[in-house]
Amino acid sequence: MTLYSNKLSVDYSKMRKNFTATDEQVFKLLNNIDLKNKDILDFGCGDGVYAFKFIDMGAKTVVGVDITPAMIELANNKIGGRQEKVKFIEADGENLP
């Protein structure tokens, strides 16, 4: 298990938009699934970028889980007015709350 440092988390979040090859494949598949009104678990959510896309695709709620405190902090800083739909939790995937 790897925890990102605060600096690495911030750097990753800033550079994330430069790494979209996987995103294109993932969202091509997700477009075939109707996410409307579904509750989604975003496991390994990082800075929350996918969680917000899931909401934009119509998901009812998204819970993002990541082991790195700095990533959860970044995700929470981006939440804006979406607290009703998105929640981020710091947790180890082997010991989910």
Image: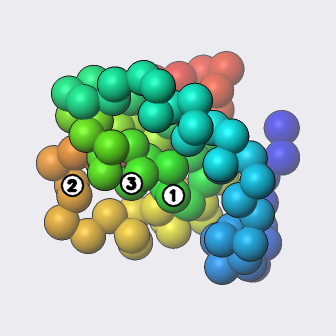
Instruction: Return the residue found at the far right.
Output: 2
Question: How far from the left and from the top, in percent, is residue 96?
Answer: 53, 23
Give the quarter of the image for residue 14. bottom right
Q: Amino acid at mark 3?
A: Phe
Residue at image position (65%, 49%) is 23
Q: Amino acid at mark 1?
A: Val
Q: Nearer the viewer, mark 2 or mark 3?
A: 3
**Is residue 70 among what the camera can see?**
yes
Residue at image position (66%, 71%) is 17
89 left or right of 21 in image: left
Label 1 – label 3 distance at C-alpha: 6 Å
Residue at which label 2 appears: 83
Give the quarter of the image for residue 4. bottom right
Question: How far from the left and from the top, in percent, is residue 69?
Answer: 59, 57
Quadrant into which the C terminus falls: top left
Residue at which label 3 appears: 52
